[in-house]
Structures are given as structure tokens and as C-alpha cells.
Image: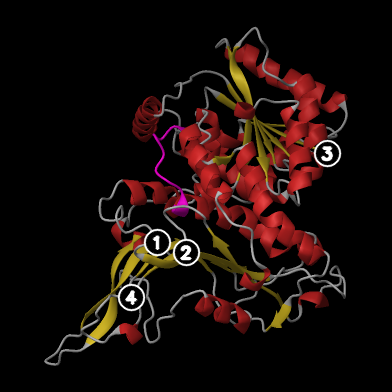
Amino acid sequence: MAGTDSSASSRQSSSNSLAKDLELPVEQGCLSIVVLGASGDLAKKKTFPALYHLFEQGFIQSGDVHIFGYARSNLSDEGLRERIRGYLKGASEEHLSEFLRLIKYVSGSYDSGEGFDKLNKEISEYEMSNNSGSSRRLFYLALPPSVYPSVCKMIRTYCMNPTSRTGWTRVIVEKPFGKDLDSAEELSSQLGELFEEDQLYRIDHYLGKELVQNLLVLRFANRLFLPLWNRDNVDNIQIVFREDFGTDGRGGYFDQYGIIRDIIQNHLLQVFCLVAMEKPVSLKPEHIRDEKVKVLQSVNPIKDEEVVLGQYQGYKDDPTVPDDSNTPTFASIVLRVHNERWEGVPFILKAGKALNSRKAEIRVQFKDVPGDIFRCKKQGRNEFVIRLQPSEAMYMKLTVKKPGLEMATEQSELDLSYGMRYQNVTIPEAYERLILDTIRGDQQHFVRRDELKAAWQIFTPLLHDIDAGKLKTVPYQPGSRGPKEADELSEKVGYMQTHGYIWIPPTLA
């Protein structure tokens, strides 16, 4: 049984230890997880599979949890379960059947009380049968942001945990959190009138990725990096997201947002915060989020000449995309941090679709060696590369002596590839981590309201200029590196590309 095996008890012990370290309360008892938008793609592909894997590993247990799906679709309990089963191929039938029995479906609209009143009665009935005296209610909004205010109002009116029971109500909301500063602030105000900040969990799944979560440990638990991680040693830092496919039928939706709103303003900026922030006082969520806000507030206004926008040829062939669309499918943007650590170091945030590879990585490029007696500058600089996906890895590019009788140098690497080092370890999906964090009440990996505001303050002027047509996209070929102007911008601000060296992920063969 998933809820009683030895791995479950060991993970529970680990969870308790972590909660103690972070001063989080260790909670037991009745847990109701409500997935709103249960019939949609996000819920079926991400939310329910994440819940299943948490159940399979014993983090949520059958005696303590019940899962409710809510949507407008006319479905039965069994109908929803069969939909979910289709996205859990390869799962243990014993565990899967037990998990699916925990799921109940409630049909209703998102803006009327009748459906939410029915949902509350179902939750309350489960809580009464559980007999634990507690009421922990987690609402996951797998919905478009346009319905957040009405749904949250319904939750507040009909579905809060009863005051007669111990426990809490928490709400997970998905990005995008607005389209610019004003819309984000309006949404924050609407939700803030209904819930306290410690009840709101603004999810950015990049913060749940293994290598992103490793950044704080890497930076602040290793003496090696402490004296190097600053403007005296670092020449430039790139944070890159590349996809080798286009909008794939989502052109109409994507055209409303573009690559900056979709990827850079949230995912890459969150990575930027963890790379650039100062050491927090402790691992308490608020101390970490305080430092993220500080570094965001230290970012200078973006200069037009340090921005390259691109749109891949064929993007406007999608009939849902306007013929005159100026929406970027590629962007390279230089951020500059005005503080003692990073003054003068360019942070190049780059993201694009329909490129020649699929990857997300951080590249910390160090300065040239002064007094280079080996005359090996042309071979490239030291770079510390953190591959976020796929083939998770960290490697340091070094200049070494080439084996042989001659004193010749070449570039090689010190390599920590997770597939080799952790062969028997399954790396959890980001949504698993973040849902578990929400159950634990750990907001470290979620976006705080003032952090969201600071992020939009950086990008809103640029986005308004793009929307007004003041900055134009340049075309690039699908399957290429993107616009040549982006490489020229990186070179202009100091990035030196290594020629003749390619990192090859190691294999077991």
C-alpha cells in the first residue's frame, strides 16, 4: 500500500526534519485537494500526475487526503478518473486504482454559488467522515487568469475551512499574473481583498526544477564559489531558454503574450534572482524572498539598444495570428544590476522558439586570465554551466594540457551529470515539489506580491514599446540560432563564444 510502506515513513521523517529546520508546522489530518479546471489540459497533464506521484511515494496518504475535481464539463466521477488514467501510463495498477478511488468530481460554473455550495458540501462530508477535527483545504486553479477573481470570490464565500476546525485554506494560482504592471497590480488587489498573502501561492514551475532548487546550495554551501561570484571575476552571465518547435497551433494564444511575457519575465527572471541575489539570513521563505526583491529593485531600466527581438519565418502562417503581428517569438535582453556585487556585469536573458536546439541553461563566463603565458585566450574562457533541462548537469569549462609530448592546451570540463552520478534516483517533476511545498506551507518557491510588482516594473516599459510598434522584430529562419543580431549583442556586451568545443552529455554506454 502506498500510504504504509517503508519509503513513505522515511519520507515523512525527512519532511518532519525539513519542517523543523524551516520552522514550519508539521501537520497531520484531513486534507482536501480541489483541482479547479479539472477537465482541462493543465490539470490532466500536470496537476493530477503530480498528485499521483506524491501519493505513490507516500507524501499524501489515502487515509488523510481526498481529491476533488471541479469544472463545467458534464462528467461523472468515473469519467474523470478514466481521463486521468490515460495520462498515467506505466503506473502501478495497484497504486493507480487506489489513487483514482480518492477522486470525486463536481460539476458547476465558475461564477455562480450553486456549484461551489455543492463543492463545499462534498468537502465537508469528507471532513466529517474523516473525524480528525482538522480541515486543510488546498485549491489549485488550473484555469485562465481571467476567471481568477470570480473563482476566488466563490471560494471565499462558500468553501473556506470552517472556523470550528483547525487547519487552513490555500490557493495556488498559475501564471500569467497579468500582462503588465497595471494589470498585475489589479489582479493582486482583487485576490488580496479575498485572501491573506500567506494563503496565496503564485506558482512558477521553474522554481520547482531540480537544478534551479540547487542554486542556493551551490552558491552558499560551497566555499569555492563565494569569492568568485562577483564583478571582480565574472565577465557576463547568460540565462538561456531554447525550444526547437514553434507555437504548434497555439499561435493565437501566444500572440497575446509573446516570448517575454511567456518565458523571460517569469521563468528566466526567477532564475536570475537566484543567481544574482545576496545570501539570505536563513532558509526561511520570507528571508529568501526578501533578497530576491532587493536584487530586482536594483535592476537598471532596460536600454533599447540592448534588446534584440525576433519572429521566426512562418509564424504568421498560423490563421489565428494577425498578418501584421509584431509579437516576438525570440528575445535577447541585457539586464544590468546596480549594486556592489554586479556593477558592470551584463546578465543576458535569452529565449526563443523554433530554434536549432531545446535546452535551458545558465552560463557564468569568467574574465580572461591576466598575463596569459600559454597564449590560449582564443580557445575560450572558463565557464560554469548549469544545464537546467534536458540532461540535467553542471560542468566547468577549463583549459588543460592536451595529452601528448607537446605543450599544447585545449578546453575540457569538470562534469557533474545527474544521469551518471544519480543513476538510480528519479528526479521529481516541478509540480510535485511545488504542490508538496504548498501542503507544507513553505512559500520559498512561490512569487510574493512585491516580487511580482518589481518584476513587472522592469519589463513593462519595454513591453509597452513593443506593443506600440516602437521596437520591431527581425525575422529568423526556423531551426537556426535565432537572429544574428542576438549573437552580435552578446559579443558587444562581452560574451566570448568558445569555438571548437562542444559539451557532450556522458552516457552509460
Q: Could you give the CA–CA distance between mark 2 and mark 3, rounded to whole angstroms? A: 53 Å
The amino acid type, in three-letter code, at marker 3 is: Arg
Q: Residues within 10 Å of mark 1 (few under 14, many from 20)?
A: some
Q: Going 83% across and 65% down the picture, which residue do you hit?
A: 468
The amino acid type, in three-letter code, at marker 4 is: Asp
Label 1, on which residue? 231
First reached walking from the N terminus: tag 3 or tag 1:
3
Q: Quadrant of the C terminus?
A: bottom left
First reached walking from the N terminus: tag 2 or tag 3:
3
Q: Could you give the CA–CA distance between mark 4 and mark 2, rounded to whole angstroms? A: 16 Å
Question: Percent position (x, y) of residue 285?
Answer: 48, 34
Give SS at disc 1: loop
Label 2, on which residue? 344
Q: Residues within 10 Å of mark 2 (few under 14, many from 20)?
A: some
User: Which SS does the magenta portion mostly show?
Assistant: loop
Name the mark on residue 368: 4
Q: Going 37% across and 76% down the picture, which residue do you hit?
A: 504
Q: Quadrant of the N terminus?
A: top left
The amino acid type, in three-letter code, at marker 1 is: Arg
Q: Residues within 10 Å of mark 4 (few under 14, many from 20)?
A: some
Q: Is residue 133 left or right of residue 2?
A: right
